[in-house]
Amino acid sequence: MKHQKFLFPFFLMVIIPGIILGIITLFGFSQTLNRKLSDTIFHLLPSHHTLSKDIVIIDIDEQSIAKYADHPELGQWPWKRTIYPTLIGYTKLITHPKITIIDIMFTERSDYDDSLVAANINLGEISHAANFRDGGIVIPRKNEEDLGKKFNVPLPLEIPFPEYENVSFPIGEIGETSPMIHVVNVIPDGDGILRRFTPFIRWKNKHFPTVAVQAFVTGEDYQTEWKDGYFWIQKGEIKREIPLGKDGLVRAYFYTEKELRNIPRYSAAGIIESLNQLNTSEVDDPEKLLVPPSVFDNKIVLIGTSAASTHDDVVTPHGLFPGVIGQAVFASNMIEGHMLQELPEIYGIGFTLFILFIGVIVLFINQWHLLKNVYPVFAVSMFVGVFYFLYRMDKVISSSSFVIAFPISYLLGFAYLTYTEGKEKRKYNSILRNLVDPGVVSEALEDMDSLKKGGEWEITAFFSDVAGFSSISEELSASDLARLLNEYLSAMTKILKFNSGTLDKYIGDAIVGIFGAPIQNQAHSRLACKTALEMLAELEILRSIWNEKGDYTESARNMAFRIGLNCGPAKVGFMGTDSLASYTMMGDTVNLAARLEAAAKDYGASILVSESIESICKEEFHFRFLDWIRVKGKEAPVKIYSLICLVADLTPEQLEAERMYEEGFQYYLNRDWERAIKSFEKVSEIYRQTDVASKLLIERCKSLFKNPPAVDWDGVFTRTSK
């Protein structure tokens, strides 16, 4: 049975979400979602890498275009190529950059190509841009194959680098004299966002380095290694593992938006202005120039554009940025080893299924309600914790599986839990609504586990029974008997429930009730006493109605009942089977209450209570001491009292009679039988009617007078019947 209760929730919370994940993964919907979600999470998590300090940018920005709008060479875009040797030369006036990487294409002829050719030959450490593409009209160039051979990096063809059909190398002698070339292609994801880059591009089985690789190797010799699906690049003592994906791309660590905006960028206009200051001797110390040449010393210099008119923008996870910023990020990733490894999607799915399995245990096996309530927070915290732990290790676990499957799993599990708990609540509500006041039922059902499990705590046990009911039942027809019982039991049960009592059961005309369970109530004894007195008053009303109508027989119209009350620890809870259970009580406390109800007949008392009830409730209710008895099944003597009325309703006559009764009882204990009898007789005189308790004690004194008790007699009367 337990296995069945577990298997269906497991199917709902693990198998169904797992099938949905499989379908989404199979159709490839999850890949883009994974990357979008990871972008969001990256923004929320603290950054643990900083952009390389080796990178600086010479930026042809809006200021550069606007400042020289009327200049014959710089007043329109693209600028004449004579300006680039000027910019490159400025970086090498008194310093020596590691490499200058030009992020601008020179794939068409110009009248000023000679200036770039001269820069290639004389300035060195310059890398020119090449662009690759698929489709379109292809016009072969005579030096294309030669340049391909010159700059080709021999690599195994099984490495899954992106491959293109066509190439645009730097034109003519610019390409032929270029010390190095790099590929400027960027490959955005399906949603148009640039998150990944590739170290190499393939064309006609030849491989060419991208900006990132060129920035890492800085024109020096390097080695590559491909083994078991892993790719390395080594320059000197530095070895970088490139966590390539199946498409030959690697996920970039994009740092923070603030860092991207604070990459050292020097306006081309500022460099030209600084050069003019030097040429006109306006500034003697180069460090006082607008752009000091020393900022380029031992740096990797990227020359790019950010002006809107150049149309070189890319969409990054931080929004729209100039393309040269994206290239700077990729270069920094290679230089510092900040690349991210996107783990196979099965890892994310496996982790998610593990979380869902824990969810089944938490919701359907765990009995700790607080854990059930915080389960979503626990699950999300686990996911974020694992994601961040891996992120710190530069690994990215797929997040779409958790984001999709967990809400589905939780909603299905919570819905089923609500249904099953609701079903159980309806079952127990069906039982309790006949036993307890509706207000108590709703409160009891708040904690189903405790309700079903029950417990042991302080209660007041209530037993009532109609005196001589067997004789009454013989006098009435079946229909009248049923009507009489319904009227009587309905009226009494209504009072019981109104005072927060729980109906345990009916035994014919007898009512068994519990005060203080299933909802614990510190005032259970007081409520039980109040109930007993109100039942006495209600019975008077019923008797008057029956007499007025002439209903039933005379003995029925004059019916009386007896009530026994006792408080103390007892075991309470639902007992029975899953299909048939009742809320009941067990223990010595309960047994004594039943014995007191039976003993009430001997003393002519309507309500007989134990000393424990009297000691708790004597401030509000008045009790008359009756006797010390030893009930069947218990050795310890019990001091018994009759519940008379509220303290406020007590009369002087009652007080005097009770004082005389207690005086007689003391004579009784002292074995002074004659004085005891006289005192007991006075009690009836005060009441002006026979006092049953006094009569009982008189008969007992006479018997003991004739047959004196043993020396160790303690005055306790032992009842031999229940």
Image (tube, grey):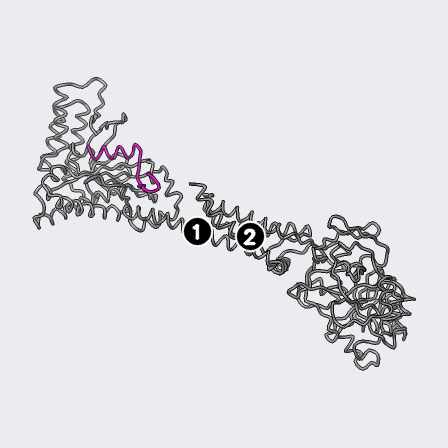
Q: Residue at x 22, y 42 (%)?
A: 532
Residue 126 located left or right of residue 375 = right
Q: Position of residue 282 (x, y in %)?
A: 88, 74
Q: Residue at x 16, y 34 (%)?
A: 601
Q: Is residue 107 in view from this perspective?
A: yes
Q: Position of residue 646 (x, y in %)?
A: 21, 44
Is 309 situated above or below 459? Answer: below
Q: Earlier in the sequence, mark 1 or mark 2?
A: 2
Q: Quadrant of residue 600?
A: top left
Q: Amino acid at mark 1?
A: Tyr
Q: Indicate which disc residue 380 carries.
A: 2
Residue 3 located left or right of residue 561 = right
| Residues at marks 1 and 2 touching, judged by CB atoms closer than 8 Å | no
Which residue sits furthest top?
A: 711
Q: Amino acid at mark 2?
A: Val
Label 1 element class:
helix
Instruction: Please state, as top left, top right, bottom left or bottom right, where the C terminus lies in the image.
Output: top left
Residues shaded magenta: 575-598
The residue identified by callout 1 is 416
Q: Position of residue 154 (x, y in %)?
A: 83, 56
Between circles 1 and 2, the one closer to the viewer is 1
Is 710 situated above or below 528? Answer: above
Label 2 element class:
helix
